[in-house]
Image (cartoon, rainbow, N blue to C red):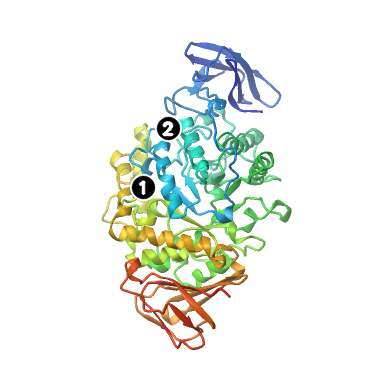
């Protein structure tokens, strides 16, 4: 069963709407000619009809109880915006050229998160395509696109989308997204799409009119929760299960990133996340290459990513906020909000060896015990990062690490993420130290909603920024200020930083001990007095040791130097990387060398291939 409008050729289109509480439903075609065609219900509340003389591009509403028209909740395209008519799309028209594509394994992914409207000045899918080759040159193997579901206006992060099946028209619409994905696959780049299954935005949310999609049984940060386990939830579950299938099959998406699953509530026998994982698995079976689901979760609950046979939901991977928080606080010293739970090198060491920092310890921020050990979970199931859209954009001034850290610390942060035994994620522009902020922006049309968002943002930051005003999220300039200055990557230290990221990713890909994602092949030691983290990784005959020096002072290591002969692969203090010069030898022997001198805030990497 396909929901919404399904163009089947020869000017014939099937229409299906789930509306069990309606007494009468019709398709109201409004262009190119106006017609009203009644639909027929079945016992489950699905209204269906096959309509002739319908062309792709035709515009329509659903008419409820002979009184009100609303756009299709399963609309693939809203050419007139969230309040306008829906468009019939013929998906068979697009000529894909990726038949030989077989995806990128999750453990081989280097993810690059981008926002379409701010990644380029043009702000379109088409404008991303010329940059794919340079991302490949950097070492990226997958782009992650922030949500593209149709939202109000032309400026938004995407989390206020109200058409989960629609593609934002200002980005280039249906064909624009397909062209981008096809171009990525032709060049060996996987595509991850960020999707939102925990809420819909407030403006243009016509699912409210159907009365069955939301519940007040639970509360989310955005209001009522989606009804995954109450009366009439069967149709809601099907709506979102099919959305998983829709993106993976119709658009050839490689993976979906599920936004904030902590706000998805389901107490039923089979959790909706498991149902979504099963749907993704069915696509893998039909097409022969693996599709992935990646959750955003701060539960520290391994059940989310354990296989269903081990009592889990079967989600393939998850973002690791613990790793980010531990790294961020060690680098910046910040302690406000949830950062109050972090800040020690011991916690960062635990993030390396255990994925989660909180595995049952008491959280001062949450004021409760939090998390459990992620047993039976592979290292490749965790995505780690120093920056992402949340951790940058949810700061009032949208400040990146390039605003908070020194050049030396930027390199240190890059190494901490990329040399970890997890899947690294980069946030657009971080690879060259982009100086533009990434601010929160919207383009709502409802004046009262706009004012509510403005006041909400100001209130949220009042405790931290007493003398400053939050940038106006509705202002066009707020979005324009967030656009990347792509030309910066060729200039001065920013060019050096780009090359440093490239070198780290090259080492990660080519050195077996770094390419093997297994935290059980990792030893971490905290050198307390020196504020240094020592990490050893091994795989078969490949061994790597590296030191992350978070101290602002020169550090001399005299104990626990590894035995054997070691060759230097990288020292971020080297002149090549914009430093003052390396103070460690090109080759050292742990039995004969008495000391290693680390420059302040540097990473030093050696390998020992037997």
Q: Is residue 302 above or below residue 89?
A: below
Residue 448 spot, x, y in % from top left = 36, 35
Query: CA–CA distance between discs 1 and 2?
Result: 30 Å
Nearer the observer, 259 or 118: 118
* Residue under label 2: 172
Percent across and percent down for residue 590 are 50, 84
Name the image quarter holding the C terminus: bottom right
Question: Vertically, is 257 above or below 349?
Answer: above
Image quadrant in which you'd find residue 579: bottom left
Mark 1 lies on a secondary structure that is: helix
Farthest residue, direction left: 467
Q: Quadrant of the N terminus?
A: top right
In the image, residue 371 above or below residue 186: below
Task: Provide residue 300's location: percent of width, then percent of height.
Answer: 58, 59
Q: Is residue 298 visible?
A: yes
Lower sequence index among marks 1 and 2: 2
Which class describes the residues within 10 Å of circle 2: few (<14), some (14-19), or many (20+)? Answer: some
> Residue 572, position in %: x, y?
38, 69
Q: Give the side of residue 80 with respect to residue 368, left or right.
A: left
Q: Is residue 470 above or below residue 324?
A: above
Residue underneath mark 1: 457
**Res. 232 image quadrant:** top right
In the foreground, 155 or 44: 155
For the point 44% across and 76% down, the residue is: 532
Seen in the image, is 1 located left or right of residue 158? Answer: right
């Amino acid at each position: 069963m396909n929901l919404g409008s399904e163009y089947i050729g020869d000017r014939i289109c099937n229409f299906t709407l789930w509306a069990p509480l309606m007494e009468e439903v019709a398709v109201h075609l409004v262009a190119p000619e106006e017609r009203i065609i009644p639909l027929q219900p079945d016992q489950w509340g699905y209204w269906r009809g096959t309509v002739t003389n319908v062309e792709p591009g035709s515009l329509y509403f659903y008419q409820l109880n002979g009184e009100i028209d609303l756009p299709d909740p399963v609309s693939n395209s809203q050419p007139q915006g969230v309040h306008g008519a829906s468009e019939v799309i013929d998906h068979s028209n697009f000529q894909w050229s990726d038949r030989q594509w077989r995806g990128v394994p999750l453990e081989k992914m280097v993810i690059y998160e981008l926002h379409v409207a701010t990644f380029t000045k043009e702000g379109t899918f088409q404008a991303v395509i010329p940059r794919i080759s340079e991302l490949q040159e950097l070492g990226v193997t997958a782009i992650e696109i922030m949500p593209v579901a149709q939202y109000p206006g032309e400026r938004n992060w995407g989390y206020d989308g109200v058409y989960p099946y629609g593609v934002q028209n200002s980005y280039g619409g249906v064909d624009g997204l397909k062209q981008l994905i096809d171009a990525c696959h032709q060049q060996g780049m996987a595509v991850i799409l960020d999707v939102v299954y925990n809420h819909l935005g407030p403006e243009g949310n016509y699912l409210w009119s159907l009365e069955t999609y939301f519940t007040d049984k639970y509360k989310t940060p955005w209001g009522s929760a989606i009804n995954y386990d109450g009366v009439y939830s069967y149709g809601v579950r099907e709506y979102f299960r099919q959305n998983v299938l829709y993106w993976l099959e119709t658009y050839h998406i490689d993976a979906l990133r599920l936004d904030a699953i902590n706000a998805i509530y389901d107490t039923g026998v089979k959790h909706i996340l498991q149902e979504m994982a099963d749907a993704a698995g069915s696509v893998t079976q039909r097409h022969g290459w693996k599709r992935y689901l990646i959750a955003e979760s701060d539960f520290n609950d391994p059940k989310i990513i354990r296989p269903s046979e081990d009592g889990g939901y079967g989600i393939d991977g998850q973002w690791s906020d613990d790793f980010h928080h531990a790294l961020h606080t060690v680098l910046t010293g910040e302690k406000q909000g949830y950062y109050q739970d972090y800040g020690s090198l011991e916690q960062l060491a635990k993030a390396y060896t255990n994925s989660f920092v909180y595995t049952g310890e008491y959280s001062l921020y949450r004021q409760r015990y939090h998390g459990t050990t992620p047993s039976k979970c592979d290292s490749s199931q965790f995505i780690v990062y120093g920056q992402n859209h949340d951790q940058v954009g949810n700061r009032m001034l949208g400040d990146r690490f390039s605003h908070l850290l020194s050049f030396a610390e930027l390199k240190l942060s890059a190494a901490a993420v990329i040399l970890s035994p997890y899947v690294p994620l980069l946030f657009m522009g971080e690879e060259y130290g982009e100086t533009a902020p990434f601010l929160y922006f919207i383009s709502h049309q409802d004046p009262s909603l706009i004012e509510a968002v403005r006041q909400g943002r100001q209130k949220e930051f009042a405790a931290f920024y007493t003398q400053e005003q939050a940038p106006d999220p509705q202002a066009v300039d707020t979005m324009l200020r967030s656009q990347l200055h792509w030309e910066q990557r060729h200039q001065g230290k920013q060019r050096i930083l780009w090359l440093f990221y490239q070198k780290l990713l090259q080492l990660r890909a080519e050195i077996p001990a770094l390419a093997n994602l297994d935290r059980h092949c990792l030893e971490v030691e905290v050198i307390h007095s020196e504020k240094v983290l020592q990490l050893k990784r091994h795989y078969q005959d490949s061994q790597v040791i590296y030191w992350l020096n978070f101290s602002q002072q020169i550090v001399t290591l005299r104990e626990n130097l590894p035995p054997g002969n070691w060759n230097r692969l990288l020292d971020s203090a080297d002149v090549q990387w914009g430093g003052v010069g390396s103070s460690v030898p090109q080759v050292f022997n742990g039995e004969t060398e008495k000391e290693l001198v680390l420059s302040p805030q540097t990473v030093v990497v050696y390998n020992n291939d037997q």
